Amino acid sequence: MPTVASLPSIVGPAQLQLRGPVCMCQSHCQVMKCNFQINYVKCEHMVTEQDISKLLSFLKGLSDQVSDVSSSIQSLLKKVDSGEISTSKGITFLEVKYHLLLSYLMNLTYVMLQKTEGRKLSGCPAVDRLVEMRTVLERMRPIDQKLQYQVDKLVKTALTGAIAENDPLRYRPNPANLRSKLEEEENQDESSEEEEEEAKPKKYVPPKVVAMHYDGDETVKQRQEKQLEKAKKRALSSALMQELKGEYFDGPEEVREGVNLHRLKEDKEARHKIEYEEDYFVRLPVTRKEKQAQRRLATTSSLKSLTRFDDITALDQTREDMPAKKKRKLPSKLRKKLQKSAAKKRKRKF
């Protein structure tokens, strides 16, 4: 017995008259009477006149929406061709996504066309393409959710032309502020100083340097004697001389408390360890690292002054035996300024 779906191929549409609801499925239904007139069809998948009216209204709304979309797309294409809208700096992820959606809709439309014409879908390449594109779109969904905030922010900025005040990313750290700007500041200082010097009247201005003792009236002999006295004072106050003085001096020994940073650190750790042992009634073992630190601390305080035998050499020297004083090297920035000022003075003389 033929089904309803197979009747149009047997009987023409003018000869087929349906009485009652129409069955659109191709299974689980049988035509009760088929003398080119159908009185009743027994099936759960019935299509009534109300459903047909809804379908027609839906198709009409769909056609209106398609016309609106096509008109808006045509206007956008004209703006892109004229150069009003730039697409060179877009997001490539969104471009791939939109191309996939467009291909998905095209293949879906082709499948719908095949179904309306009553053709078989088995072996259709459009179905395989739909499955592949749907899989790719599902895999792209987590990335799309992560980029949603940035895309919305860029679109809003492009529309309004300003960043929102309550944007949380405005308070993120700027790595450019962490770079050293000493070179830029030095260049700016030099350029500003040169401009100020050119703008000032031509008069003598004392250099703004650190105040130093004036020793221009002293002779070379007097300077050497002062250097010798300073060296003797340093030698007498050295640790070696103090130990020799305490060993051979007959007077009472003076006891004073000194500050040793290494000893303070070790004492702090020792106090913390003692407090922990007293609070929890536990004896902590002494590790190998702590033993090495204790031995190293015993010799650290005296290592620096142990080999300084040259501290007392000034006691046995005369003014002629004193080594020549080295000339102090000026900083590069100060030396450049002095060279520039000397060159300007030479130019003024000529």
Image (cartoon, rainbow, N blue to C red):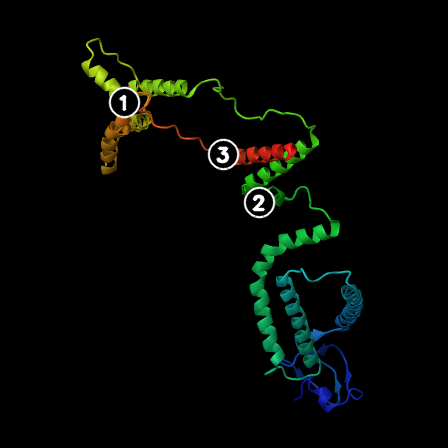
Q: Which residue lies at the image location 39% right of the left edge and 28% below the top edge? A: 325
Q: Is residue 202 above or below residue 226?
A: below
Residue 297 image position (x, y, % from top left): 26, 30
Q: Given contact means CB atoms under 8 Å apart, are the residues at marks 3 and 2 in contact?
A: no
Mark 1 burial class by Cα count in 10 Å: few <14, some 14-19, many 20+: some
What type is the residue that disc 3 sits on? Answer: Pro
Residue 248 image position (x, y, % from top left): 19, 14
Q: Given contact means CB atoms under 8 Å apart, are the residues at marks 3 and 1 in contact?
A: no
Residue 312 - label:
1
- Does the image show residue 338? yes
Which quarter of the picture shows residue 100? bottom right
Q: In which quarter of the image is the C terminus?
A: top right
State how many labels appear: 3
Residue 331 - label:
3
The kind of secondary structure element at disc 3 is loop
Residue 176 - label:
2
Q: Is residue 330 above or below residue 232?
A: below
